[in-house]
Amino acid sequence: MTHLEKKQKTNIALTWWATWWHIFPLSSIYNYLKEDEEYDFIWVWEEWGLEKEIAEKNKIPFYDIPAWKLRRYFDWKNFYEPLKNLTGIFFWIYYILKYKIDIVFSKGWYVAIPLCIAAFILRKKIYIHESDTVSGIANKIIWKIATKVFYSFPHDNIDNKKFFVSWQILNPELLEWIKDLYPWQNTRLWVLVIWWSQWSSTIFKALLKSLEDLSDINFNVILWEKNKHFKNDFKKFSNVEVYDFLTQKKLGKILKTTDVAITRAWATTLWEQSAFGIHSIIIPLSNSAGDHQAKNAWYFKEKFWSDILDEEEKLEIEIFRRLIKYKSLRKNWLNLSWFFTALKIIEKEIRN
């Protein structure tokens, strides 16, 4: 095959803000398509953050972008920072042309706005995936110029042309270390405790107060970056395994053995738990934008009988009561039939 006969690759730019549960869907798209020689990727965000770490690990070119953060409250920065978006638009017109970017795939947030506007000006394809039940300001702006908008949850905008449900993007790495699709039958209840934010201190404290009376239940506790100061407190209990961080491969192994999870209402986390047949006890973050965590939680309560707890109301007692209630619960299936649905839908659209 001569050089002229070779098929030109499609170049895809990925963008999102620095939280694990939205970075993972983007890395999932990369992991799903990277073996296909039709695609090349770049990653877009400000220079600090988790994206750069993941991009470098996967040898994806990483580019910093100037952008204005959208604030819902009064701040003097709202009067002059919008100039960053104007700068960012011209910045990305140049880089889209230089690096021959064909597609922008965004999970939203303010950094995506100048990139998507530049892509629209140059008539490039723009795809958005909205994980939550409530869309953020950036996505509502980008909707108007997007080629396709994918939703994890049913949404009023669905018309099967531009807006449609793809369900949540889950990372294929979760399955890499799983030998079979049959759940383990645990002799004791296994509970996964997974929160990452600095707003989770009250939850960890409530759980620690109950652990002494829950010695016949096993726990995997994932602290993440903001909660490492609790590590020694949890290590005092022989029935608790505590981790600072877990890769997606290691998390997949733990999800397979988990019967019950105590979690915030991040969309990716809830859908992961549903796929692995886990019963969720959800404690929504009360100050989430648009109250999206509470709405995510209520969807799972209605569809999957998840429990919802209010962290302001006797949380220590309520966690204890739920765990005692589910002490004999053992999952007996993995719900993985739809695991790749979102990725297949997105790949089909990208190929069109």
Image: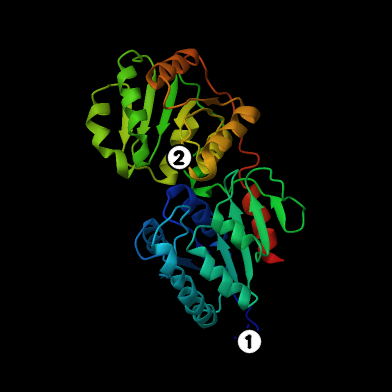
SS for callout 1: loop
Residue 247: x and y in percent read 40, 46
Q: Quadrant of residue 117?
A: bottom right
84 to the left or right of 201? right
Residue 253 in view (yes/no): yes
Residue 21: x and y in percent read 47, 47
Residue plotted at (55% across, 23% down)? 331
Q: Quadrant of residue 144?
A: bottom right
Identify the residue position indicated by label 1 in the image: 4
Which label belongs to residue 287? Answer: 2
Residue 188 in view (yes/no): no
Residue plotted at (60% across, 54% down)? 129
Label 2, residues with CA under 10 Å away: few <14, some 14-19, many ≥20: few
- The N terminus, quarter of image: bottom right
SS for callout 2: loop
Question: What is the CA distance from the residue labelled 2 to the residue labelled 1?
Answer: 55 Å
Residue plotted at (30% across, 19% down)? 209
Label 1, residues with CA under 10 Å away: few <14, some 14-19, many ≥20: few
The answer to whether marks 2 and 1 mark residues whose Cβ atoms lie closer than 8 Å is no
191 to the left or right of 155? left
- The C terminus, quarter of image: bottom right
Residue 132: x and y in percent read 57, 45
Kind of residue at badge 1? Leu
